[in-house]
Image: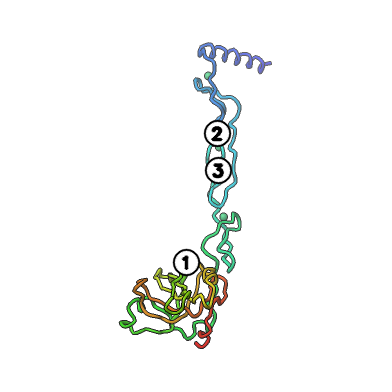
Amino acid sequence: MRRTTGGVIATLFLSVLLAACGHEHTWVAATCTEPATCSKCGETDGEPLGHTWSEATCTVPKTCSVCGEVEGEALGHDWEPATHEAPETCRRCGETRGTPLLFDIPLGFAGDYAFGLFEAYNTPAEENGLGDTMIWFNATYDAVSTIDMPDVKPGMQAFVALSKDEGGNTWVLQLDWNEYEPIDKFVAMQGHQLCVAGMYLGYSEVYQAPAVLAEKLFDRTTGDIVYSTWFSDAF
Ligand SMILES: [Zn+2]
Ligand SMILES: [Zn+2]
Ligand SMILES: [Zn+2]
């Protein structure tokens, strides 16, 4: 009985207040954290909507898709180690980083070739005295071009590639001639990490870089010896 009386009194009181206030509520829609609220008097209606959470991902924390509120931290990638076939790969989102593992240069591949230190070979052979040295280095090239050799034989072409070693230095690779190998063989190796073994021909004035007659190529991407001249077996 008392409660009913109290309720009646409260309702009366509110009516008096409304009358005193004398406005229709202007409702601002509910948000994640606030209920619908009258912008004039601050009266609220109902409950806040609550956040609409998207689960955390590798790079983004748990986030409300409505208001953008974040909670906690991004998960970070869950890296699977690189293999010869695939680079480091996130088990969760598939993102990759780096490159697949390179194959080791097989024992004996460059056995009788000295490591070609660029600085030593980047001068005319008359100066460095290293002409005809057998050397090896790791390098990659992006394109193969042809040089016509009409003086040797009509129709004869030499294949040449400007390669970059691991220090970013340019070496001219004199590859085979069209008489002996199809150019496709060398085009197929474009962009591959190679170990090149061959004979230092001297400094090329044309290319402004040391030139090497490639005798053996090992593809560190596939683990295959992809080219070997008949005469390189002697070294
Ligand atoms: Zn109001
Ligand atoms: Zn929210
Ligand atoms: Zn990830």
Reply above or below: 74 against 174.
above
Q: Nearer the viewer, mark 1 or mark 3?
A: 1
The image position of residue 173, as x and y in percent, is: 44, 74
The image position of residue 102, as x and y in percent, is: 53, 71
Residue lying furthest bottom in this view?
A: 234
Taking the image as shown, residue 121 lies to the left or right of residue 20, namely left
Contact between labelled residues 2 and 3, with CB atoms less than 8 Å apart:
no
Crowding at label 2, few (<14), some or many (≥20) Cα neighbours within 10 Å? few
Q: Which quadrant is home to the N terminus? A: top right
Closer to the camera, 51 or 116? 116
Q: Quadrant of ligand 2?
A: top right
Question: For the residue marked with disc 3, what is the amino acid?
Answer: Thr
Kindly identify which residue carries mark 1: 143
Closer to the camera, 164 or 35? 164
**What secondary structure is marked by label 1?**
loop
Taking the image as shown, residue 4 lies to the left or right of residue 169, namely right
Q: Nearer the viewer, mark 3 or mark 2?
A: 3
Question: For the residue marked with disc 1, what is the amino acid?
Answer: Ala
**What secondary structure is marked by label 2?**
loop
How far apart marks 1 and 3 lie (CA) works out to: 47 Å
How far apart marks 3 and 2 lie (CA) works out to: 14 Å
Residue 63: assigned label: 3
Kindly identify which residue carries mark 2: 33
Task: Give me the residue at 49% from left, 76% from top.
Answer: 177
Reply above or below: 166 against 69.
below
